[in-house]
């Protein structure tokens, strides 16, 4: 059975101010879900709900076709890159990768981590503490962190932020690859970021 | 069977990862430690100045010891959660690891920090405060051990609450004091018994109260932490 | 006057009953007003 | 409606009986209270002071129960009820403390003696204070509801420890405490004649009804406010 991510009547309100409601959508393996909307339309809120770090006020997010899920395997399905995801900046890039693996309850594989850092062109900086990184380098490291455990659902919130041309090329490669092996979710207001999408949630319509 | 085993292993590994992360981060930044040490030193010197060479009764001194420990704990034990919230890394933790592992790791960290803090305070206190005598060492040591565990247990869950409330620690003593009062009253009484030279058996009731307090607080905190942690 | 001086308790009693009546009337009226508001609200919604 | 009128009549009767019935050395009639040497008229406080103290505990428990309900169902009304109960609890707690302190000044010579029951009510006051400081500090409603529910539950599980701690640490002045020459026992057993007991329990019932009524008024007001606020 193919992996499927389904939302049922999602609604989120802060202080009774409704951010969005009645979000019903689904995305299956091999598909791309685009979450579009201008600033403040709730893209990030929806992303947080999808990857289970925020509870919806109403509705639910269901995952089918992933086998039995426990506290760890559910989290292991998701990889997230987003501006509000902070790194531990007193640690180096490699240490951050190892820490993330350990927090997922896994043994970090140093070789895979090095390969990942090479892929996002951070390998010369692997031992430097992250607080010395530029924002573009941090964004690259977030990609390495999101991909380290081979997530079946990759969620990218503002995927291109702070990236230079080289970085964008790397990210396009990552997106193409994810589409072949799982679900890709992209939240952005810049439609040139993404060229293929099968499903779309447009948060502007409501507003 | 094997799935269950690996899940248990993953819990242990993840909890230890949270603990080790905090520990190494603490070693690099001295975020909580320096404040704690300075607090203990300052408070003890203030007590020394205010006593002005005159002795106080062992009862008063037994109480004062725990005043120093309580306020030092209030200055340091909330850091572990407040730090995540201030730097915005709370969500990273939420994304990577289940709430139970976060709580276990943070509790472990606070236990170590709390034990270190209590030990430091007791050593400095015994060294500098003249009238402070312990006649029954066994009662005293048990009290110190159980007291620091209880202190760390109760302050960890309160720290989680105030970190979420974004109050930067001003509320910490206010919320902690009523929760910690049963513990403080018991340890002060037990310390007094130790100063008086009571036999070990006389403090058995105090130890029972301390142990059940620790068990109850840790159980309830574990059950409630998930609600605090996830928005 | 003399009676009251000897029986201070009755003064206390009168004051206590007075306070209770005041509170009771206040609560009763509040209850009535709430009921009216609730009815209005209910009608608005339907 | 009938219940409300019944409450009005009952509490009026309680007040009149508690303050109006004569106290004599050797009661002959059903309406006479026995006079207790050393207390005399001051014994009448029991009809009002104990119910207020009882309600501050009741309110505390109510607040915790609705806190648990909130965490399970995430219904904002549960949080409103929890907070309303805590508000009333604070009110009754202050009343119990003040009436107790004034009475203590006349009977025991000072306003505050740190006797076990005084200490417990002080702790309860501290908890209520902390609860409302926490609520004031959090602006997002859902977060405020969750955090204050969790806090009230944690507070509620640590409070019972005082029952075991108090007798080990201090001797009490309240009846029923350790050191009472007439033997320890619950406060209600305290040298009360039948007619005093009737008035006492009627007072407890009346105050409980009053609490429930006030609670429902507060909850209904809060609900109206909640629905009335603009959503935006």
Image (spheres, coloured by chain):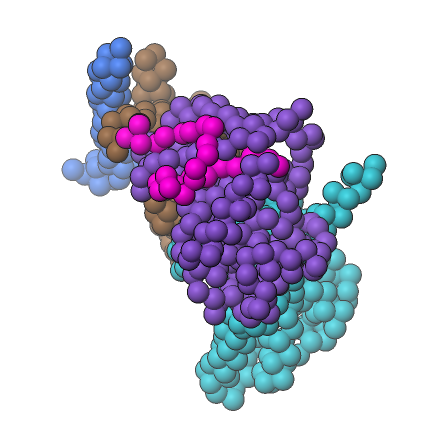
Question: Is B165 above or below relative to B138?
Answer: above
Task: Please provide the residue range marked out in magenta.
Answer: A181-207
Q: How many numbered discs, if any?
A: 0
The image quarter containing residue B120 is bottom right
For this view, does C39 lie left or right of residue A203? left
> Could you say where residue D9 lies in the image, as x and y percent from the top left?
32, 19
Q: Is residue A60 magenta?
A: no
- Tell me, by letter, which chain the rendering colours brown: D
> Could you say where residue B165 lies in the image, as x and y percent from the top left?
42, 50
Residue at image position (69%, 49%) is A105
- Tell me, by letter, which chain the rendering colours blue: C
The image quarter containing residue D182 is top right
Question: Is B189 above or below relative to D173?
Answer: below
For this view, does B102 lie left or right of residue D52? right
- Tell me, by letter, which chain the rendering colours purple: A
Residue at image position (50%, 56%) is A140
Colour in which the image shows chain B? cyan
Of A139 and D48, nearer the camera is A139
In the rendered image, is residue A74 in sight?
yes
């Amino acid at each position: 059975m193919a992996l499927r991510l389904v939302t049922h009547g999602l609604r989120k309100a802060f202080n009774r101010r409704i951010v969005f409601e009645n979000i019903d959508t689904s995305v299956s393996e091999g598909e791309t879900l685009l979450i579009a909307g201008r600033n403040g339309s709730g893209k990030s809120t929806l992303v947080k709900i999808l990857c289970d770090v925020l509870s919806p006020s109403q509705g639910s997010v269901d995952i089918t076709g992933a086998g039995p899920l426990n506290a760890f395997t559910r989290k292991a399905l998701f990889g997230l890159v987003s501006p509000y995801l902070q790194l531990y900046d007193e640690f180096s890039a490699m240490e951050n990768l190892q820490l993330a693996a350990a927090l997922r309850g896994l043994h970090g594989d140093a070789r895979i981590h090095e390969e990942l850092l090479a892929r996002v062109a951070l390998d010369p900086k692997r031992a430097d503490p992250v607080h010395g990184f530029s924002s573009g380098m941090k964004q690259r490291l977030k990609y390495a962190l999101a991909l380290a455990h081979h997530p079946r659902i990759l969620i990218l919130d503002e995927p291109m932020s702070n990236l230079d041309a080289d970085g964008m090329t790397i990210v396009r490669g990552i997106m193409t690859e994810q589409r072949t092996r799982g679900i890709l979710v992209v939240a952005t207001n810049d439609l040139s970021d993404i060229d293929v999408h099968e499903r779309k949630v447009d948060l502007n319509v409501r507003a | 069977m094997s799935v269950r085993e690996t899940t248990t292993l993953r819990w242990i590994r993840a909890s230890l990862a949270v603990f080790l992360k905090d520990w190494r981060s603490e070693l690099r930044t001295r975020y909580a430690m320096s404040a704690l040490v300075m607090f203990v030193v300052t408070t003890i010197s203030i007590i020394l100045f205010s006593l002005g060479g005159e002795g106080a009764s062992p009862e008063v001194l037994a109480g004062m010891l725990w005043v120093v420990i309580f306020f030092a704990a209030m200055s340091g034990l909330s850091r572990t959660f407040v730090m995540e919230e201030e730097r915005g890394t709370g969500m990273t933790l939420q994304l990577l690891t289940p709430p139970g592992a976060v709580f276990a790791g943070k509790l472990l960290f606070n236990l170590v920090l709390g034990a270190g803090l209590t030990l430091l305070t007791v050593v400095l206190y015994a060294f500098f405060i003249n009238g402070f005598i312990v006649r029954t060492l066994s009662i005293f040591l048990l009290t110190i051990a159980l007291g620091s565990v209880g202190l760390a247990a109760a302050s960890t869950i309160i720290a989680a609450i105030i970190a979420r409330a974004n109050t930067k620690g001003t509320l910490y003593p206010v919320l902690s004091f009523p929760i910690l009062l049963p513990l403080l009253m018991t340890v002060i009484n037990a310390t007094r018994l130790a100063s008086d030279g009571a036999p070990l058996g006389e403090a058995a009731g105090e130890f029972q109260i301390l142990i059940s307090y620790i068990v109850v607080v840790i159980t309830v905190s574990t059950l409630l932490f998930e609600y605090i942690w996830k928005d | 006057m003399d009676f009251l001086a000897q029986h201070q308790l009755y003064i206390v009693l009168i004051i206590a009953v007075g306070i209770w009546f005041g509170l009771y009337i206040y609560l009763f009226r509040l209850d009535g007003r709430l009921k009216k508001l609730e009815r209005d609200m209910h009608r608005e919604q339907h | 409606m009938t219940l409300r009128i019944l409450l009005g009549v009952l509490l009026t009767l309680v007040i009149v009986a508690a303050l109006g019935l004569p106290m004599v050395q050797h009661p002959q009639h059903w309406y006479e209270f026995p006079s207790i040497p050393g207390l005399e008229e001051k014994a009448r406080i029991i009809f009002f002071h104990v119910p207020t103290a009882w309600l501050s505990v009741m309110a505390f428990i109510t607040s915790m129960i609705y806190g648990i309900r909130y965490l399970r169902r995430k219904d904002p009304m549960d949080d409103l009820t929890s907070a309303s109960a805590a508000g009333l609890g604070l009110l009754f707690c202050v009343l119990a403390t003040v009436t107790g302190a004034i009475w203590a000044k006349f009977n025991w010579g000072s306003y505050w003696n740190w006797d076990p029951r005084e200490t417990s009510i002080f702790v309860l006051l501290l908890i209520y204070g902390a609860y409302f400081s926490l609520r004031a500090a959090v602006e997002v409603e859902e977060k405020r509801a969750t955090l204050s529910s969790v806090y009230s539950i944690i507070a509620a599980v640590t409070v019972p420890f005082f029952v075991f701690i108090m007798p080990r640490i201090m001797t009490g002045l309240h009846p029923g405490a350790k050191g009472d020459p007439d033997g320890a026992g619950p406060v209600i057993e305290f040298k009360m004649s039948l007619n005093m007991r009737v008035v006492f329990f009627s007072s407890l019932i009346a105050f409980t009804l009053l609490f429930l009524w006030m609670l429902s008024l507060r909850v209904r007001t809060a609900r109206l406010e909640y629905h009335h606020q603009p959503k935006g």
